[in-house]
């Protein structure tokens, strides 16, 4: 059956080829009767139509291919340009955010009569219990152990170790840190002790005192380490049920220690420079 089908196809193709040859010959030599020409034209027309359509199809496919290749290159160029613009936008955004942080540092500097040394945070203590950071300024910049460190909007901690070009800052939320403070509204004095991830605990406030959630806690200036009036935090919880003479008070720091990038070290009072 397959052989018979192939024979039929071959026969038809041969007839068409002969018809085309005959048509070409007749057109060239103007021979043959009108009836023969008509028959030959009738037989050759479908073949020519298929041939023309095939050529057109190949031509269109080639044009589409060229168009798609060009479109793909355009897409690659556009993606590259978009990536470049996105990278540039990120740089502008980072510059804007840095300028905003520095603006806050400058406003904080203007509110205190001190000589400040600006520094960048270059490392954080990975230990679970210790709460310290490293900054990129040291004794070569006039820094000494014990100097207070601040960042918007308030106190960060104090210098505990100082080398020539780097220093360690003990954050006041460290469990070994204790600061004399005041409740801003009532001027009641107490001690802030660091509680790590839980923030701070305000100690030695009598149960007879009127302490409310939301009250602001500031440094008292007692002890000579921290200037008076530095913002510490806000009272987040007051427990009067605890046994003992004193209230159990939790304080949430104003400073977000997880986002510190730049700080100010309070080096010396302005009057000491004259």
Image (spheres, rainbow, N blue to C red):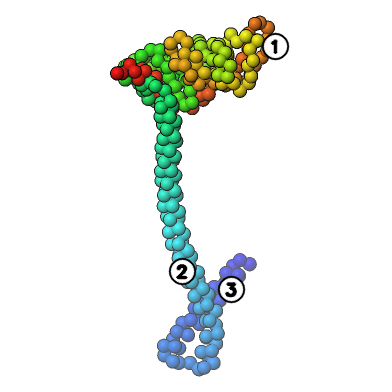
**Mark earlier in primary sequence (3, 1):** 3
- Residue that appears at 54% across and 15% down: 182
Give the distance between the C-alpha atoms of the residues marked 3 and 1, in whole angstroms.
107 Å
Indicate the position of residue 118 as horizontal and vertical percent values. Answer: 37, 25
Indicate the position of residue 4 as horizontal and vertical percent values. Answer: 60, 70
* Residue extending farthest top: 244
- Residue that appears at 52% across and 18% down: 218
Q: Nearer the viewer, residue 134 or 234?
A: 234
The answer to whether 257 is drawn above or below residue 130 in the figure is: below
Q: Secondary structure at mark 2?
A: helix
Residue at image mark 3: 8
Where is residue 119, by image quadrant?
top left
Q: Nearer the viewer, mark 3 or mark 1?
A: 1
The answer to whether 87 is drawn above or below residue 5 in the figure is: above
Give the distance between the C-alpha atoms of the residues marked 3 and 2, in whole angstroms.
31 Å
Residue at image mark 2: 59
Q: Nearer the viewer, residue 2 or 49?
A: 49
Mark 1 neighbour density, 10 Å: few (under 14) some (14–19) many (20 or more) = few
**Mark earlier in primary sequence (3, 2):** 3
Q: Nearer the viewer, mark 3 or mark 2?
A: 2
Indicate the position of residue 169 as horizontal and vertical percent values. Answer: 43, 17
Residue at image mark 1: 241
Q: Nearer the viewer, residue 141 or 165?
A: 141
């Amino acid at each position: 059956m397959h052989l018979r089908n192939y024979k039929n196809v071959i026969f038809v193709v041969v007839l068409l080829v002969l018809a085309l040859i005959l048509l070409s010959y007749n057109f060239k030599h103007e021979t043959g009767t009108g009836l023969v020409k008509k028959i030959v034209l009738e037989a050759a027309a479908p073949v020519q139509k298929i041939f023309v359509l095939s050529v057109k199809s190949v031509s269109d496919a080639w044009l589409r291919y060229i168009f798609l290749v060009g479109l793909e290159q355009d897409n690659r160029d556009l993606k590259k340009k978009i990536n470049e613009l996105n990278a540039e936008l990120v740089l502008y955004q980072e510059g804007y955010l840095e300028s905003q942080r520095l603006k806050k540092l400058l406003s904080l500097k203007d509110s205190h009569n001190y000589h400040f040394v600006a520094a960048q945070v270059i490392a954080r203590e990975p230990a679970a219990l210790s709460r310290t950071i490293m900054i990129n300024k040291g004794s070569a910049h006039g820094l000494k152990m014990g100097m207070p460190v601040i960042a918007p909007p308030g106190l960060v901690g104090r210098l505990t170790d100082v080398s020539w070009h780097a220093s360690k800052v003990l954050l006041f939320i460290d469990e070994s840190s204790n600061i004399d403070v005041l409740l801003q509204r009532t001027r009641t004095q107490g001690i802030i002790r660091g509680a790590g991830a839980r923030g701070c605990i305000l100690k030695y406030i009598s149960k007879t005192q009127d302490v409310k959630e939301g009250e602001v806690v500031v440094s008292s200036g007692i002890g000579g380490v921290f200037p008076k009036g530095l913002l510490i935090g806000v009272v987040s919880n007051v427990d009067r049920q605890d046994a003992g003479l004193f209230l159990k008070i939790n304080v949430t720091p104003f400073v977000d220690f997880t986002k510190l990038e730049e700080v100010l070290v309070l080096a010396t009072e302005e009057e000491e420079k004259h």
